[in-house]
Image: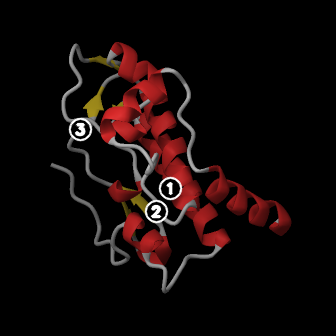
Amino acid sequence: MIVMELCPGGSLLSRLQDLTNQPSLIAKINYVYGAARGMAYLQTKDIIHRDIAARNCLLGENECVKISDFGLSFIGKTLREKKLKKVPLRWLSPETLKMGVYTTKTDVYSFSVMMWEIFSFGQLPFHKHENHEIRPLILQKKAKLNQIAWGTSLQRWTSWL
């Protein structure tokens, strides 16, 4: 059992989708940083989360990101599944989809998709595609997240720097 502190900010995804109170660019960068620190900690404990996504991050005091929902997690360096069951398809790496292998690198790929979620107001990755279309797109490396949302955020970020 995992016991966590109370996270009064609720889910990161809900915060991102609240268009009446959008987080600032600096807040979004802090979300990314906080999630990266949490993932680094998990890696030191040989934990493969397998479901890194904005919906599985909570906001603690001062909107500090806490990774949650360890229902699919695994302790070890590598996990191989012959058949992928209920998996977060839109967040899975091509290697995992192709070979059923999970490592911390799988979580890093999912983290990159979550970064996109953060900078696109919590939009569903590959939102223009049905679930049955996602796997071939990712495997053929033709999957592209919405460039407009990403580009707009990147322009704001670089102008801030």
Residue 30 quadrant: bottom right
Q: Secondary structure at mark 2?
A: loop
In percent of width and height, residue 86 lies at 20, 35
Q: Is there CB contact under 8 Å for labels 2 and 1?
A: yes
- Real-space Cα separation, disc 2 to disc 1, in angstroms: 5 Å
In percent of width and height, residue 50 lies at 33, 36
Q: Residue at x 78, y 61 (%)?
A: 155
Q: Which residue is mark 1?
A: 117
Q: Is residue 48 visible?
A: no
Q: Is there CB contact under 8 Å for labels 3 and 1?
A: no
Q: Is there CB contact under 8 Å for labels 3 and 2?
A: no
Left or right of 35, for residue 60? left
Q: Which residue is mark 3?
A: 72
Q: Amino acid at mark 3?
A: Leu
- Give neighbour class at mark 1: few <14, some 14-19, many 20+ (Cα, 10 Å): many
Q: Amino acid at mark 2?
A: Gly
Q: Which residue is mark 2?
A: 122
Question: Which mark is drawn over residue 145?
Answer: none
